[in-house]
Amino acid sequence: MTLLLPSATPLARRKPLQRSGSSTFYLALIINIHANPLMNFEAVNLKLQVRPNDLDSLGHVNNATVLEYLEAGRWSWLEHHNLFHGQRIIPVVARIEVNYSHEILPGEVKIITKLKDTEENYYYQVIFHQIIEIFKNGTAKVAADALVKVAFIDSIERSLRTLQDFLNENKQQDG
């Protein structure tokens, strides 16, 4: 997946989204991901063992635990790509959509995490595509398929920040 690292979008290039009293909210223009490819991020696989406390009264993994598995997959993806959490600008889940297709029973699961391959990318967020695979009779089956929108927040100012701000902060930590 090639990810666009946009330069700062001037206010003049933003479109008003909604007016409310004296406040105007702005939506950044959608940026074409193929216009300025800079970094490639590969998919990351994380294997986890289902724990007894992950199971509900029906003996399969509780849907809330599936969200924890997906979170572990995203942290693994960030660490694999040397994008550190716990800095000033942090990634936070803005929206999550999960399609469940098979129950998850005790055993091993694999969480596959990658950036969504799309023609469009948003200035203030990224979209992860995550899959949880289970293994039945030696065959991998998709148990859950999720799209997770992640935004970037300044943990001190409590304000929205750009993907570029997040990447720049991590670049400074590396160098």
Image (cartoon, grey):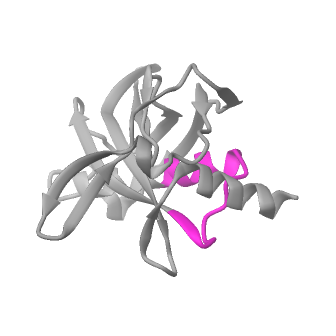
Question: Which residue is more in the foreground, 155 or 25?
Answer: 25
Tell me what residue is drawn at x 47 percent, y 20 percent: 138
- Which quarter of the rendered picture does the N terminus lie within? top right
Residue 122 included in the magenta stretch of the image: no
Which residue is the extreme one toward the front?
Answer: 12
What residue is shown at x 41% (from left), y 50% (from top)? 150
Q: Is residue 81 magenta?
A: yes
Q: Is residue 50 visible?
A: no
In the rendered image, residue 57, in percent from the top left (x then y), is placed at 15, 58
Image coordinates of residue 78 in percent, x first then y, are 61, 50
Q: Residue furthest bottom?
A: 156
Front-lying residue, 165 or 8: 8
- The residue that appears at 70% across and 55% down in the rendered structure is 168
Direction right: furthest residue: 175
- Residue 146 is at least partly visible in this image: yes
Please report the bounds of the magenta region as a residue range.
Answer: 72-90
